[in-house]
Image (cartoon, grey):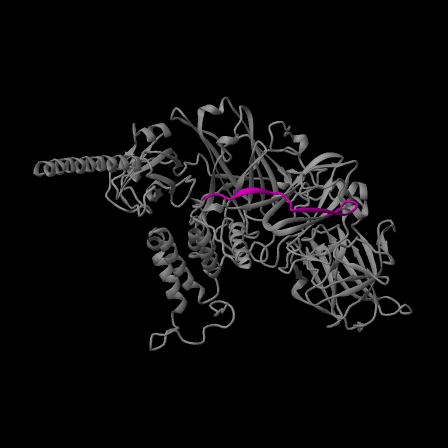
Amino acid sequence: MKHRRLFFYLVGTILVMIFVVSFAKSTRSGSAKAATTLQVNDLRINLMKQPLSVAKENLQFSWAIQAAQNDVKQTAYRIVIGHNQTDVLKAQNLVIDSGWHDASKSSDVHLKQAAQKLADNELYYWSVQVKDNYGQVSALQTAQAFTTTPKWQSTQAIWNDPKQVPATDFWADHGWQNYAIDLQVKTASALGIVFRAQNQKQYLMWQIRTDHNELRPHIATDGTPKLLDNQAISLNQVKLPTDAYFQVRLVIQGQTVKTYIKLSQAAAYQLVNTKNLATDLTAGSVGFRTGRSETADVKDLKITSLDNNQVLYQNDFQKATSDFPGTKVNAGSLNIPNNVSTPSLLTTQVIDPQEGLKGSLSAQGHYVFMRKSFNVDDPKHIDHAILNVTARSGTKSRQFVSKLSLNGQFVGVSPTRKSKDSTSMFYNTFDVTKQLRSGENVLGALNYATEDQVFLAQLTFYYKDGTQQVVTNSGLANAGWLVKDGTNSLGDDGTSLGTQYYQVAAQNINNLDFPSGWDAPSYQADKAAGWVQPHKVGEIATDQNKLTAYPVDNMAQFEITPAKVTAEGEGHYLIDLGKEIVGGLALKGINADQPGQMKIRYGEELENGAVKWQMRTGNHYQETWTYRTGTQDFVTSDLMTYRYIEVTGGPTQLTKDNVRGLALRQAFDNSAASFTSSDQRLNQIYEFTKYTVQATNQDLMVDSQSRERGAYEGDVLINALSSYAVSNDYALARFSNEWLTTQRTWPAEYVLYTVMSAWNDYQYTGNKSELKQYYDLIKANGDQLYTGSIDQNGLVKNGLHNNGWNSVLVD
């Protein structure tokens, strides 16, 4: 019995030992397998997923880790940098090997040796290994490319000189120089009679004011009418009625305008004013303008040439007419509603339907096509093709200047506008490697700016053998760039899509003049087609305009298929994109048997079954597109906020196949956040909010892209917090807050939000760089705000300005 117990004891002991050894082996084996699950992903530099043109002196590395185990924590990291992906992943021929650092930090990681060992104008790759609290070590699995600050071969700017374009004047050619305007007017306040209008920005206007019994002569050269001699003229000879029609005659000849008034049919015309001018406006259209509180009715309009007594235009308004856009005919009179602040003018098409379609707008140089042709032997030898672009000025339009393309494919837009008190002039950097082709390639830029017009581009090839080549710099002598004025092609007639806060021209695309395929290799860009050498406009980089890389990933363009296209009648379509977007529109494969025009109206809502294009925000989203015979495309680079499109006068059937909304925004990872509940309404609110963040993140967080396009500290705070909740992109929020440190806004309490936004950035990114870099500036803004407003108790005094700068705004 004793031996039997000993036997079982020995057997038991052996079994326990076998189990322990087996368990140990199993544990070690499990650890080995677990090591393969530790991975590093989401590599970023300076919070960017595509870090291009980053300063080597301020590289902030970040990454994320994942593994199969629970509660995995990083315990150490190792960063490696090399010239190509292969060397980095094999950890050979490295430029920098940081070695292992015992740290849990995976955001805002700096390498002290980067500034010394890295060079400007270079392409690098980097990767990172990590260790975790389970003893696992990740492999060098993913390498991210980045480029450092470029060396510009030239910073000389180019643009188009509109003087190089032969001048044409439709109105002068058709006898609209010296003429008399006869009409009957009824208004309780005022009506502006517009004449010699070259477009909706350049015109003369005689405002008849019945409420003050005055004549107020104006001239507009930039869209804003200004009172001539800063003086209204009292009409002491007559008493204008406010509730009855009276007759007005304007006789415009040379530099003299005579104004006549007749109060009844039986009375005689009475000369009430003679005005001598000194203006270049010697010919042009006729129309009307009203202010916010002004309406008027017009009867029996007749315009007669003083040179040959020919009737240039006549209308008794007994029938409906579209001759004056934005007005309506009612009971034999033309009603001009309030707020026709952009004049309603007779167009060239009304005067001469055939010739007028072609357009004859005088070159203004606001819209400019630019192209550069270059050859590539074999794109396979190119590791990265990097394009740097900047331009000015987007201040008045509050948007980008350049829409860029390569071989007819969209590349991006550039740049973000400057903040008011900053010296940073931003440039954008694009990776265009995948868009290259063997043989001829064409780089294109469609630019829009009305002032301080400059453009600069540099394309650099980084070859796989380690060499590099600047393929083109637009500022160099004999760089081979060509430019073409786009005034007529884009119908830049002064019509604006903007509001009182900004002005941006409607893109009235005229395919009878538009250089179709202009940015493709097959296009013939020659002098006969209007292409000329660019005009050198001087140095773009100055003390007040220091070239600075845009520190956010670039916006992209996303094509949106309509949810519904409804045929409302012949050539009349109502299109619903399903959701609102910010961007432009494309109609593709439009076929026409003969030239003509179609109206395109955009809006956020419908009204009586039509698109409400005269929006609540003050924007008037309407464009006129002219089509030629044959098949053609229409593509805009607009930045409008809309969901619905209404097309009238379309020459071909529109379907979901040939209509695309062009959403312009940051890339958005829909899988980064999700929410679902048993409450369907709550789910809808979440999706609505999430989509709003996705749709409205452009190059700067603003109040809206429709009404104001203004960046405000309060709006950035809200936008950023909303973005943090549904997205893991942080660079745009940071940049928007930094942008406002040099352009603070008027509300007194909004300066405080800059501090809050900087703190939120740190909490969500673990990155102290913004706090360190902008602390003094943020503090100075706050100190300046409340200087002289602190009482003896250290509290802010009640009584900050109620209007204007430093007003208290309670949103």
Q: Is residue 255 visible?
A: no
**Magenta segment, which residues?**
553-573
Q: Position of residue 607 (x, y in %)?
A: 71, 58
x, y percent for residue 122: 38, 33
- Decide: is 292 above or below 427: below
Name the quadrant containing residue 224: bottom right
Residue 755 occupies quadrant: bottom left
Q: Nearer the viewer, residue 378 or 342?
A: 378
Q: Residue furthest left?
A: 2
Residue 115: image x %, image y %? 30, 40
> Considering depth in this image, is 374 or 580 the residue closer to the camera?
580
**Is residue 286 something that shows in the picture?**
yes
- Left or right placement of residue 207 versus residue 94 in this view: right
- 657 magenta-colored: no
Magenta highlight on residue 569:
yes
Picture residue at 74% right of the left edge, 50% below the top: 282
Give the left or right position of residue 767, taking residue 577 as reference: left
Q: Is residue 175 above or below residue 26?
A: below
Q: Nearer the viewer, residue 225 or 436?
A: 436
Residue placed furthest toward the front: 1
141 horizontally vs 337: left or right: left
